[in-house]
Image (cartoon, helix red, strand yellow):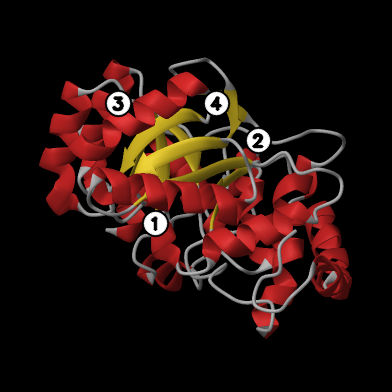
């Protein structure tokens, strides 16, 4: 492993060992809350439409939480975040050059993870120009310390017509396994829809939350029609959703779907939509990661249960 910001592999291993107390806490958390997702079971999966490969329902977004250096106190929690994801059967880790140091941090931590991590690595190209895009993606390979990326996405559709031929070529060569596009705002839905109709793609990453359901009208049905996997970003909306719900009691039927927290229920709301393949809530907190992953277990919500939640948030 190359030196990064003066930190060697040995120092990174020392930091990971220092997080053991956090990891021990989260293993206990995973065993007791929720209690029904243990007993040898692993996270539920959903097939990627273009290949039928199973993908675990809950992954990890690295925006903000992984934009930290080894010298930062928050960095010490991150090995336990990854371990909490993998212990539950999750694999998807999503990053981007837009996320500051997140790709580099992800690569560092995966390089020292024992046993070898099962990560499904997703990142993005976020620049203009063919050569600039190639250079940025090559840097992502270096930072993530991998010779193959599972999913390369064109971030926010930036110069997508220029980048798409490179992505298709690299997919043919086996350097990337899947290609996709992303966005995070309703103002882009018309363009997203046009690209989905015009181009064969494996994935769309898009904003979808209990209080942000605009994609339900046209985007999600189109993805189902076109055989495009959907990865949900911003699954807790802009941040106000959980704040509004935290003091409310969970519905009486929550235990029937093996849910014991509002974050789990908010994620299960999304996963109950048949077009959704995976949700990627971002966190740098191991306890939150373990709790989020709990949404990938147990029965999905019924239509009536989804409608009750919609009525609750107004």
Tag 3 near tag 2, CB within 8 Å = no
Q: Earlier in the sequence, mark 2 or mark 4?
A: 4
Identify the residue position indicated by label 3 in the image: 223
The CA distance from mark 2 to mark 4 is: 13 Å
Tag 2 near tag 1, CB within 8 Å = no
Residue at 44% in and 65% down: 99
Between residue 225 and residue 176, name the one nearer to us.
Answer: 176
Identify the residue position indicated by label 2 in the image: 298
Q: Earlier in the sequence, mark 4 or mark 1?
A: 4
Residue at disc 4, secondary structure: strand
Residue 90 visible to the viewer: yes
Q: Earlier in the sequence, mark 1 or mark 3?
A: 3
Counting from the top left corner in percent of width and height, residue 1 is at 75, 58
Q: Which mark is residue 234?
A: 1
Q: Residues within 10 Å of mark 1 (few under 14, many from 20)?
A: some
Tag 1 near tag 3, CB within 8 Å = no
Instruction: Give the mark toward the camera: 2 or 4.
Output: 4
Identify the residue position indicated by label 4 in the image: 46
**Does residue 21 lie above or below 288 as drawn?**
below
Q: Earlier in the sequence, mark 4 or mark 3?
A: 4
The CA distance from mark 3 to mark 2 is: 25 Å
For the C terminus, the quadrant is bottom left
Residue at 54% in and 59% down: 103
């Amino acid at each position: 492993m190359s030196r990064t910001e003066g930190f060697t592999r040995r120092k990174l291993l020392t930091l990971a060992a220092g997080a053991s107390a956090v990891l021990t806490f989260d293993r206990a958390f995973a065993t007791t809350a929720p209690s029904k997702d243990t007993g040898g079971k692993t996270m539920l999966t959903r097939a990627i439409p273009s290949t039928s490969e199973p993908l675990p329902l809950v992954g990890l977004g690295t925006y903000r939480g992984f934009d930290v250096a080894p010298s930062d106190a928050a960095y010490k929690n991150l090995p336990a975040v990854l371990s909490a994801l993998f212990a539950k059967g999750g694999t998807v880790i999503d990053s981007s050059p837009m996320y500051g140091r997140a790709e580099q941090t992800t690569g560092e931590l995966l390089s020292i993870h024992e046993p070898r991590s099962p990560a499904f690595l997703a990142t993005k190209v976020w620049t203009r120009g063919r050569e600039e895009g190639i250079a940025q993606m090559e840097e992502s390979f270096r930072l993530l310390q991998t010779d193959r990326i599972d999913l390369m996405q064109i971030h926010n559709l930036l110069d997508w017509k220029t980048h798409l031929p490179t992505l298709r070529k690299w997919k043919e060569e086996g350097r990337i396994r899947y290609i996709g596009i992303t966005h995070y705002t309703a103002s882009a839905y018309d363009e997203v829809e046009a690209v989905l109709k015009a181009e064969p793609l494996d994935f769309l990453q898009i904003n979808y939350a209990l209080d942000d359901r605009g994609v339900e009208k046209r985007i999600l049905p189109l993805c189902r029609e076109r055989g495009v996997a959907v990865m949900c970003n911003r699954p807790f909306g802009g941040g106000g959703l959980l704040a509004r719900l935290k003091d409310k009691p969970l519905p009486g039927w929550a235990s029937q779907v093996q849910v014991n927290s509002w974050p789990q229920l908010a994620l299960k709301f999304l996963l109950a939509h048949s077009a959704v393949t995976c949700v990627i809530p971002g966190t740098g907190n191991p306890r939150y990661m373990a709790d989020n992953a709990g949404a990938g277990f147990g029965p999905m919500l019924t239509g009536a249960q989804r409608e009750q939640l919609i009525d609750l948030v107004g």
